[in-house]
Image (cartoon, rainbow, N blue to C red):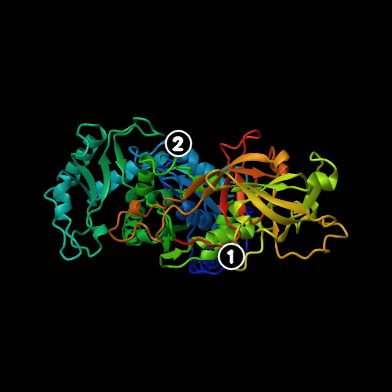
Amino acid sequence: MSQTTADANKPAPSNNFLRTIIERDLAQQGQPGQPERHFAGTPGDAAHHAAGPLDAAKIRTRFPPEPNGYLHIGHAKSICLNFGMARDYGGICHLRFDDTNPEKEEQEYVDAIREMVSWLGWDWNQSGTSHLFYASNYFDFMYRAAEHLIEAGLAYVDEQTPEEMRANRGDFSRPGVNSPFRERTPAQNLARFREMKDGQHADGAMILRAKIDMASPNINMRDPALYRIRRATHHNTGDQWCIYPMYTFAHPIEDALERITHSLCTLEFEDQRPFYDWLLGHLAEGGLLAHPLPHQYEFGRLNLTYVVTSKRKLRQLVDEGHVSGWDDPRLPTLVGMRRRGYTPASIRNMVEATGVTKSNAWLEYSVLDGCLRADLEGKAARACAVLDPVKLKLTNWAELFGSLSHVETSSAPAHPQVPELGQREFQLGHEVWIEREDFMEEPVKGYHRLYPGNKTRLKYGYVIECTGCEKDADGKITAVLATVVPDTKSGTPGADAVKVKSAITWVSVHEAVEAEVRLYDRLFTEAQPDSGDADFLSFINPNSRKVVTAYLEPSLAGVAAEAHFQFERHGYFVADRLDHQADKPVFNKITGLKDGWSK
């Protein structure tokens, strides 16, 4: 799959301010006075950057995750936005790992991120060229950039303690205080910085800071940190470095080296844009980068109700055992959502439905479920399943058909609107499983299913008349009793001879497929569980996971993992991608046929 053909059947994109900006920039490319972009570094930083000017008809975007955890639903918006814009405007989107913090980053997360971006339907390969990059591959250039800033008097080594730096930074009501190390000469700072690089100082003993303005109303411009000492093995560079660039320093450089045209970020980076522009401007003045420089644009992030997306809180849920792991189907991680059964198309369509704005907004969880139903309604095969089974005994079976072992073959379309999927067949015998809620000894008003004296239809089978039930010593109903009304089988001339007000699903006892079915619901009872001062753990839904032994129709025997189905009357289910086996089926409930969730 190429970046320009992914998701060919997607809905028509809605217009938004980012599209307006991109279309404006594309219209201006190649006009007089518009400079070509070229790489001003050395081939050692990344040889592909020396390829020459950017094609006039293209844009370059990037999705730059830090590999310190698993992607979640909020990341899906950034993925789809960056890859989608590149696809829609004939451009290229880079997958770049912002791996500048070795203490929290692991190869496990790199692999998981690559897997999830591909699963969502996107590809970083185009025309035989890979556009997969790592910030750590630019460490040599970043180091040279830092030395340039020092030599230009724009950066200094600060030896204050973290506590002193915090106190001297000031706040929104008072300006910061200059560091006592701020007026060192460039030569002194350069010597000190090289000592940092050579491992002559302890972790945390000093940092490199930009020299900007400690009185700036934007606290991010008050001499932000550029480099810190960290003795930690890096997943990509090993132990080559003991100093690492800060994200705010590395990110704009990565964009410039990769010739990114539109750096699309969520709103929390808006206050960082002045430093982004400051840094690139000074590196361009020093001849390390060339114009035109990338520009950062911010958009509102996606917040989904009834979940938390903080990496710290997600990790807490996993580490404290509130969920089974990062792929727990109740989590908003993409690996969890995949295991739950959400489809890539449903997530992409949800992102498209939310639009792109300059303000953060909350999206109701029901919107995601609606997108899932819309995606699966036209393609998920149907099947019957009994999730809370009680046995139904047809007491006149032998009398009617001559033997208790007699079976009647019933059939139903695999999908009522997709005839090419064919028919599914199953047998009706003298005992079947039905849902426990389909029988009431004393029916409430409006109840039309089984109760003594009432008739209903076994869907795709016969009309039956309830005669009573059997109970155990504790009074629990162990079986429902009914008789078959002759000559009323579905699909025969007598099918409409007896009018009934309901039809119930069933599975024959003799050919039922026993399965473990995991019924998932929302993990939290509050729409915004981590808002305010409340402990988000106090809102965990105690009924968010229930495991039942269910009986399924025989067409579900041997289906593949991750196969999707609509269980008639119950909703959408998926064969679990890890635990499902042909001889031991495991299905997860994704969502019901309609949104009926309540506290």
- Tell me, yes or no, if residue 383 can be seen here: no
Secondary structure under tag 1 reads loop
Left or right for 297, reference 556: left
Numbered-mark total:
2
**Residue 441 visible in the snapshot:** yes
Image coordinates for residue 327, horizontal then vertical, percent: 48, 43
Amino acid at circle 2: Glu
Mark number displayed over residue 108: 2
Whether 218 is drawn above or below 188: the answer is below
Mark 2 or mark 1: whose residue is earlier in sequence: 2
Task: Say which residue appears at 34% left-offset and 57% top-offset.
Answer: 530
Coordinates of residue 402 in the picture (x, y in percent)? 85, 43
Give amino acid for label 1: Val
In this picture, residue 440 sits left or right of residue 272: right
Label 1 sits on residue: 444
Query: Alpha-carbon neighbours of circle 1 within 10 Å: few (<14), some, or many (≥20)?
Result: few
Residue farthest right in this picture = 493
Q: Work out whether residue 338 or residue 221 is closer to the camera in this orientation and state it.
A: 338
Give the foreground label among 2 and 1.
1
Q: Residue at x 80, y 63 (%)?
A: 498
Residue shown at the point (35%, 37%) measured from the top left: 102
Where on the picture, by quarter, is residue 97? top left
Q: Nearer the viewer, residue 36 or 512?
A: 512
Q: Secondary structure at mark 2?
A: helix
Distance from disc 2 to disc 1, alpha carbons, whole Å, reads: 55 Å
Badge 2: few (under 14), some or many (20 or more) residues near its Cα, within 10 Å? few
> Which residue in the rendered view is the most extreme toward the front?
473
Relative side of 338 to 398, left or right: left
Q: Percent from the top left, x then y, of residue 570?
A: 61, 54
The structure residue drawn at horizontal position 22% and vertical position 43%, both measured from the top left corner, is 207
